[in-house]
Amino acid sequence: MDATLQAEKRDGRGKNEARRLRATGRIPAVVYGAEKGKAVEIAVDPKTLMRILHSESGVNTLIGLQIDGGNTRVLVKEYQLDPVTRDPLHADFYRVAMDKPITVTVSIVLKGEPKGVKQQDGILDFVQREVEIECLPGDIPEHIEIDVSDLALNEGVRLRDGSIVPAELLVLATGYKNQQETVRRYLGDAIADRVGPVWGFDAGGELCNMWRRTAQPGLWFTAGSLAQCRIFSRYLALQIKALEEGLLQ
């Protein structure tokens, strides 16, 4: 998406100048790379800027910044909002060369309902909601759309180069279903069989695989009443921390 933003150069700097500008319905801004070796101080209309930022392409909107009769192509680098009113206070722009690739972050939009949800009682885990891409400024997409209609249980979508973005933590809230069967459904038979029963008492009189290490590294379980979870989640957390710090083998 392209947009146009009127701007005018300004000479004053500092808090007093910023207040004066805001009183006249404008906000201070800076353009980097517009003139070689220095930044250009400008003033812009905050309402127009917010319409651009609230558009679907947001900060990736290619803006035609009109200064003193010239037209400079820029992207928003940073912007500051009032913490209470959420009105814009300041903005930084950077000039882009239309013939040179740049790296931007683009949001991912999912299309369709997966077969794994509709037919197999699964849950769609939307972990990576943005992705970095490299392209020419004029080719920046508003978003990347991914059709997930054909996804079945235990299937996912990979980036075209084959890379995978790892998740640091996956929390599976199972509701009233048996946790071992949930493991079987989402993690497969091999892991479910390796872990064994979840809940119930083992030969030593302890709850099976509950609040302690399981046979599958990195897989932990907590269940029971709210009071039980409050108490034993601390022991579970301490065990995980001890493993991460190398205190347990």
Image (spheres, rainbow, N blue to C red):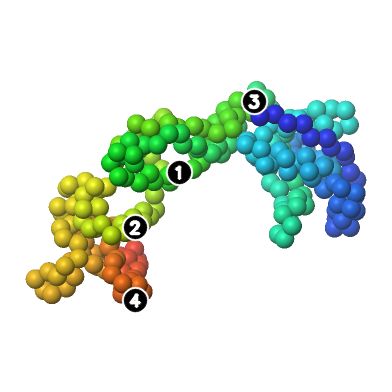
Instruction: Return the disc, 1 or 2, that comes first in the chain's sequence.
Output: 1
Per the model, the C-alpha gap separating discs 3 and 1 is: 25 Å
Q: Quadrant of residue 32?
A: top right
The location of residue 42, given as percent across then percent down, is: 84, 42
**Residue at image point 34% right, 31% down:** 150
Q: Nearer the viewer, mark 2 or mark 3?
A: 2
Name the amino acid, label 4: Ala
Q: Secondary structure at mark 4?
A: helix
**Residue at image point 71% right, 48% down:** 79
Kindly check if marks 4 and 1 are in contact, taking CB atoms under 8 A apart as contact.
Answer: no
Instruction: Return the disc, 4 or 1, that comes first in the chain's sequence.
Output: 1
Q: What residue would you read off at disc 2?
A: 173
The location of residue 175, given as percent across then percent down, is: 31, 59
**Residue at image point 75% right, 52% down:** 87
Q: Nearer the viewer, mark 4 or mark 1?
A: 4
- Name the side, left or right, on which 56 lies relative to 35: left
Per the model, the C-alpha gap separating discs 4 and 3 is: 57 Å
| Label 1, residues with CA under 10 Å away: few <14, some 14-19, many ≥20 | few
Q: Nearer the viewer, mark 4 or mark 3?
A: 4
Q: What residue would you read off at disc 1?
A: 128
Q: Which residue of the protein is positioned furthest toward the top in this rendering?
A: 99
Instruction: Return the disc, 4 or 3, that comes first in the chain's sequence.
Output: 3
Q: What residue would you read off at disc 4?
A: 227
Name the amino acid, label 3: Gly
Per the model, the C-alpha gap separating discs 2 and 3 is: 43 Å
Q: Nearer the viewer, mark 1 or mark 2?
A: 2
Per the model, the C-alpha gap separating discs 4 and 2 is: 17 Å
Q: What residue would you read off at disc 3?
A: 138
- Name the side, left or right, on which 67 lies relative to 127: right
Kindly check if marks 2 and 3 are in contact, taking CB atoms under 8 A apart as contact.
Answer: no
